[in-house]
Image: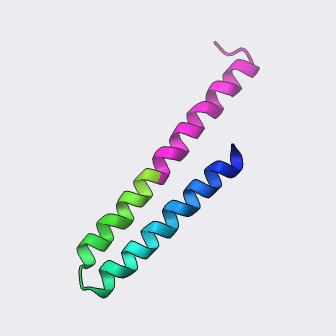
């Protein structure tokens, strides 16, 4: 699962970088910024869900319920 998440983040970063370059070269800087922002939000959503799983696991290990 760890490698899967790393590959997802890398793929999202690669796609965002390509779209950002294409949009910047065509003079659409605002859209390029929004694509970059959307990529960051998607990656942060992935990380937040993983953090939730981590905290749930820590609670269950230490019986904090």
Q: Quadrant of residue 52?
A: top right
Quarter-of-image position of residue 63: top right
**62 is within the stretch colored magenta:** yes
Judged by its main secondary structure, the magenta piece is: helix
Q: Which residue sits at x=49%, y=60%?
A: 12
The image shows residue 43, relative to residue 26, as above or below, that is: above
**Taking 50 as reference, is 42 above or below it?**
below
Task: Answer left or right for 46 relative to 22.
Answer: right
**The C terminus lies in which quarter of the figure?**
top right
Q: Nearer the viewer, residue 45 or 26?
A: 26
The image shows residue 53 at horizontal and vertical percentages of 61, 31
Residue 34 pos. (x, y %) = 30, 65
Q: Position of residue 40 (x, y in %)?
A: 43, 58
- Residue drawn 46% across and 67% down? 15
In this picture, is 6 found above or below 27? above
Magenta-drawn segment: 43-65
Is residue 61 inside the magenta stretch?
Answer: yes
The answer to which of 44 and 9 lies nearer the viewer is: 9
């Amino acid at each position: 699962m760890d490698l899967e998440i790393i590959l997802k983040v890398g793929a999202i970063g690669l796609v965002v970088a390509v779209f950002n370059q294409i949009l910047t070269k065509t003079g659409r800087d605002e859209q390029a910024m929004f694509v970059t922002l959307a990529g960051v939000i998607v990656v942060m959503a992935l990380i937040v869900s993983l953090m939730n799983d981590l905290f749930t696991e820590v609670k269950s290990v230490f019986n904090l319920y």
